[in-house]
Amino acid sequence: MNLLDANTQQPATPRWHVAEISWPGSADLDTMAAITRAAFADGDMLPGLPAADGASDTAESIEADLRAGIRLWMAHSGDGRPLGYVRAIPRDSSLWQIRRLAIRQDMQGRGVGRELVLGLERAARSEGVANVVVWALVERGIAPLYARLGYRTTGHLASPGKPLSEAVMEVRAGVPRPALAYPWGTQPKLAAGRPVIAWFAVEGGTAAVLGEAEPGSRATVRALARHAADLGARPARFLGADCWEDGETPDVEGVSARLASSADRGGDRLLLFDRPSLDVEAYTCPRAGEPELLALWRTPVGRRG
């Protein structure tokens, strides 16, 4: 889902109009549900993931959200025709959570999502809400999109009910801030010594490197890239990293052994797959095979055509 424009600067004059939808009112919930289903049905960055909840949205489920107090905004170009929608869950008097940002397919990548998110933030600020948060699904490629809007990662958690990982990303509502480079500019520091699995594109395929976190995410990746090179692989590009959930006792040896069973070669700390990362399930959906793992980061990769 290319929901947010790649441009990191907010345009001086927004091209799209954003308005909150009142309930009960004249909202066309069937159109809203159709746009949401289409946006969520075929937009994942990585293949083979469980179906997104938004892909089964209906007029009835949207009505249930509205009746439960969830807020809703629509973007249009001035003629009233919908371009996209976003919802907000009021968690308490100081926090709103973004829910189901969905842009009409022919309008994706043109800044509509940016205007919707900023409009939601303006509404939050006008009502005295201090913070806005989004649980961005890492494997679906959502986290880099919100980093462009200045959302900073404050934690990671397992997605409820699905073998996916969420980055908890927050901003102060309506406060100007720069775009953040993903993942370096968005992350809290990793605890030094924490076990980490880093993924790299290498000549002829993909490498998984098992090691320990350094003080800082960039330092961690650099150290693991050097480790891979020392073991005979030359990383060409960083693809992402995994770690264990807080409170879990890391089964590093067990995970290494199970990764090795699907790898083509390598040893305990460097595993090589003679295929692209998109064909390595341990990369595309790590929690499917190792539920205690979390995908910390996934960098944008080319989708299959």
Image (cartoon, rainbow, N blue to C red):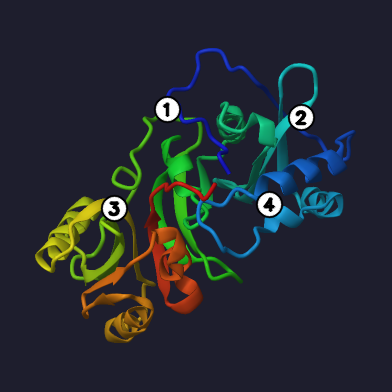
**In which quadrant will I find the N terminus?**
top right
Residue pointed to by mark 4: 41
Of helix, strand and loop, which one carries label 4? helix
Residue displayed at 27% across by 76% down: 265
Q: CA distance from mark 2 to mark 4?
A: 18 Å
**Residue in the foreground of this view, choosing between 57 and 205:** 205
Inspect the image, locate mark 3, and give the three-letter code of the amino acid beneath it: Phe
Inspect the image, locate mark 4, and give the three-letter code of the amino acid beneath it: Ala
Q: CA distance from mark 1 to mark 2?
A: 24 Å
Q: Mark number for residue 238?
A: 3
Seen in the picture, residue 222 relative to 36 is either above or below; the reply is below
Residue pointed to by mark 2: 82
Mark 3 or 2 closer to N-term?
2
Residue displayed at 58% across by 17% down: 14
**Residue in the foreground of this view, choosing between 156 and 7:** 7
Of helix, strand and loop, which one carries label 1? loop
- Can residue 73 be seen in the rendering of this structure? yes
**Residue in the foreground of this view, choosing between 15 and 152:** 15
Residue displayed at 68% across by 31% down: 106
Of helix, strand and loop, which one carries label 2? strand
Inspect the image, locate mark 2, and give the three-letter code of the amino acid beneath it: Pro
Q: Position of residue 34 (x, y in %)?
A: 80, 44
- Disc 3 crowd rating (10 Å Cα; few below 14, some 14-19, many 20+) is some
- Disc 1 crowd rating (10 Å Cα; few below 14, some 14-19, many 20+) is some
Seen in the picture, residue 250 relative to 196 is either above or below; the reply is below
**Which label lies toward us, 3 or 2?**
3
Mark 1 or 4 closer to N-term?
1
Residue pointed to by mark 1: 8
